[in-house]
Amino acid sequence: MKARALSCTILVCSTLTLPGVAGTVSLRPIADTTVQELLPDSNFGDGTSFTSGGRRGGGITRGLLEFDIAGNLPAGAIINSASLSLTVVRTPSFGVASVFDLNRLLASWAEGNGSDMAGSLGVAGATWNNRFGTAGSPWATPGGDFAATISGSRAIAGSGPYTFTSNPFMITDVQSWLDNPATNFGWLLRSESEASSTTIRRFGSREDALNSPILTLNYTVVPEPGSLRLGILAWFVLANLAATVRKKAVKTP
């Protein structure tokens, strides 16, 4: 009876494969804010929302979001998928629906603590003109420095949740931020019709417990070569031990 039990236990172990360890993590931003064309020196980093799109009264707004990738995933992990969920918490009356894009930001910035509704002057945070709200750190291009390649797109209409589904560009962005944390400046959110009135949407920010942006990542941890070799060796040892135990169990009257 003991031999049979031992045989079953070892057989289970010996049939295990040795893939990398997979995992999923959901992250809230570590920073998010709005930059607004008509208030180019005001910061909007505080509060429970940020905006993106064309304002009814004219002018463009864009959202900035950054996530801590390296601080939440194992070094060397492989990103399998990356999706971003945003929630529209306010839509202008008779607002025009449009496609919103994510573009990888190319320069560092600060969230700041200006009013998310009215904006605040003199705050050390991102504005339309400046990355840190000071004269010495302007964007190369007012409105934010971002890659021309679109990382993700999503049609957005009324209030409610929306998801930018995983695609190779978003995966590449997140993988690069994990492998090279110094290049992680997050994404810029903009409407493709930002020059059109009422395409603006107000989104829940990281301070909004119910409507915060959520970046969901699925990843695989690849074993170190030494660990992989030890794992394979252990597999063969267990397989041989299981075979030996089975033989003995068969011979036992």
Image (tube, helix red, strand yellow):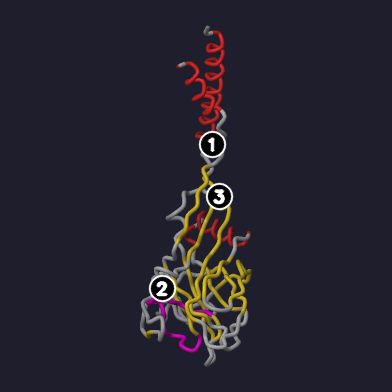
Q: Main secondary structure of the magenta part?
A: loop
Where residue 230 sits in the image (x, y, percent)? 51, 30
Which disc number belongs to residue 78? 3
Q: Which mark is residue 126?
A: none
- Is 6 or 101 nearer to us in this picture? 6
Q: Residue at x 62, y 82 (%)?
A: 193
Residues marked 1 and 3 touching at CB (< 8 Å): no
Picture coordinates of residue 94 (x, y %)?
Answer: 57, 88
Rendered residue at 56%/13% (across/down) = 247
Where disc 3 sits, the SS reads strand
Q: Nearer the viewer, mark 1 or mark 3?
A: 3
Q: Amino acid at mark 3?
A: Ile
Q: Point out residue 11 in the picture as x, y percentages from the top left corner.
A: 54, 25
Which residues make up the magenta segment? 37-52
Residue under label 1, please give it: 225
In what element is the residue under mark 1? helix
Q: Is residue 47 left or right of residue 97?
A: left
- Quadrant of the image occupied by residue 171: bottom right
Instruction: Give me the disc on residue 111.
Output: 2
Mark found first going from the N terminus, 2 or 1: 2
Q: Residues within 10 Å of mark 2 (few under 14, many from 20)?
A: many
Q: 55 and 34: which one is in front? A: 55
